[in-house]
Amino acid sequence: MGGAIESRGWPAPNGRVPGVEMTAGRSAVPEAAPGDDGSYPLHASASGKVILAELSDDRVAEVLPRKLESYTPLTLTRRDVLLQELH
């Protein structure tokens, strides 16, 4: 599936994925998390992690920003932990 993901232009070169839906609730990502364009960080969104899981570790390293920002107390900000979760 990694080829299909790449052929659709995902992941975006800025390490973000287009937002699809916003949900409110106690555990929801704060509204400040999406970028000005309505996108979410790949490492901090379920849809982003689905995309990352289909990529090689080298490609994941290429598309993610150098520093993985934290958006909630549960956001993974360590690359090694993120890669472990993706596999």
Image (spheres, rainbow, N blue to C red):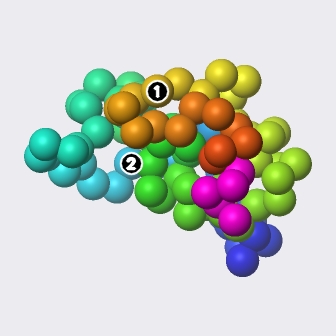
Query: What residue did someone put label 2 on?
Result: 19
| Residue 50 position within the rendered picture, expressed as x and y whole percent measured from the top left | 56, 63
Up-down relation of residue 43 to residue 10 (above or below): above
Q: Is residue 23 left or right of residue 37?
A: left
Q: Secondary structure at mark 2?
A: loop
Residue type at mark 1: give it: Ser
Query: What residue did someone put label 1 on?
Result: 70
Q: Quadrant of the N terminus?
A: bottom right
44 or 51, nearer to the observer? 44
Q: Quadrant of the C terminus?
A: bottom right
| Residue 42 position within the rendered picture, expressed as x and y whole percent measured from the top left | 56, 45
Are the two marked residues, 1 and 2, in contact with CB atoms closer than 8 angstroms?
Answer: no
| Residue 69 position within the rendered picture, expressed as x and y whole percent measured from the top left | 53, 25
65 or 68, nearer to the observer? 68
Q: Residues within 10 Å of mark 2 (few under 14, many from 20)?
A: some
Quadrant of res 53? bottom right
Q: Residue at x 70, y 38 (%)?
A: 79
| Residue 41 position within the rendered picture, expressed as x and y whole percent measured from the top left | 51, 38
Prevailing secondary structure class for the magenta stretch in the rendered image: helix
Q: Residue at x 65, y 45 (%)?
A: 81
Report the span colored magenta.
Answer: 83-87
Q: Secondary structure at mark 1?
A: loop
Residue found at the very far left of the displayed protein: 25
Tell me the tag on residue 60: none
